[in-house]
Image (cartoon, rainbow, N blue to C red):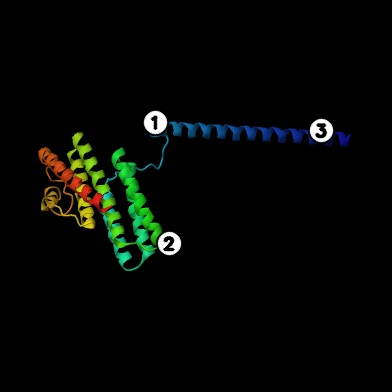
Amino acid sequence: MKRTSFAVATLLVAGLASLMLADDAKKKTDVKTDVKADVKANVKANVKGEKPKAAPGWVILEEDWWFPFRYDFAESLHNARVHYRAKEERAAAGEIDKAISWLKYAENHADKATAEELSTARADLFDFSMALKNGKPVVAKKLEAAFAHASAALARHHHYKSSEAFAKGDMRAASSHLLSAVEYLRAAARSANHEYGNEIFSFYDDYAPDGYWDETVVIEKSQLESNLTQVEKELVKLAEQLKSDR
């Protein structure tokens, strides 16, 4: 009799434990289902560009956009020259690699015509970078010619972007890209010993009178159109000179 009672009690305990485990498993499944549903809802909201219903901790930031090419590329080439002349080949190659990254960035945002030219310039600089890293001799004149072609490619890219912005009526973006085009035109001309008119300097008086971009400057559409034409002519002259230097 005692054995029978003990067996029944054991069965009751086992059954109760099974029910508790089953109920706990069901709760976990329900929680997982709810979590998946929330994740799907959030993903769906993000795809649509909407803020999820429950989004604690969100911070909204305002960002200022700037043009990374304006000085960094030219500075990298300048630093590469300094290291090269000091016989610091690997350091020079590192600076050339930085310039290559800017060319790649521009290439990804360029039209078909200028993208091809930027790609060629990038490949040329890559060859010089590898040569310097491997300790191979690099002729200074040829290195400077590669710098000139790369700078000219960026100048044409920014001139195109300026023309594009002008056509859309965005005078501010057009003048900003035009300043970049002039900056790289001058850099390319210096590398190629190409002479250009002093009127190129007037662009900085027009759009950056204090030596930096001034948001208060009033941009005249007719003046900007004339400037675009003038820079285009200078770029054509430079292209002819660079072609003869190949």
Residue 155 percent location from the top left of the image: 24, 47
Element on which disc 3 rests: helix
Taking the image as drawn, is residue 105 in sight? no
- Position in image of residue 197 (x %, y %): 12, 52
Q: Nearer the viewer, mark 2 or mark 3?
A: 2
* Residue 224 appears in the figure: yes
The residue that label 3 is drawn on is: 8
Q: Earlier in the sequence, mark 2 or mark 3?
A: 3
Going by the numbered disc 2, the residue's amino acid type is Asn
Left or right of 52, for residue 66: left
Q: Which residue is mark 1?
A: 48
Residue 89 falls in image quadrant: bottom left
Image coordinates for residue 75, horizontal then vertical, percent: 27, 57
Q: Please state which of residues 158 and 43 is positioned toward the viewer in this rendering.
A: 158
User: Of 238 and 163, which appears nearest the observer?
Assistant: 238
Q: Which residue is mark 2?
A: 134
Is 20 or 213 nearer to us in this picture? 213
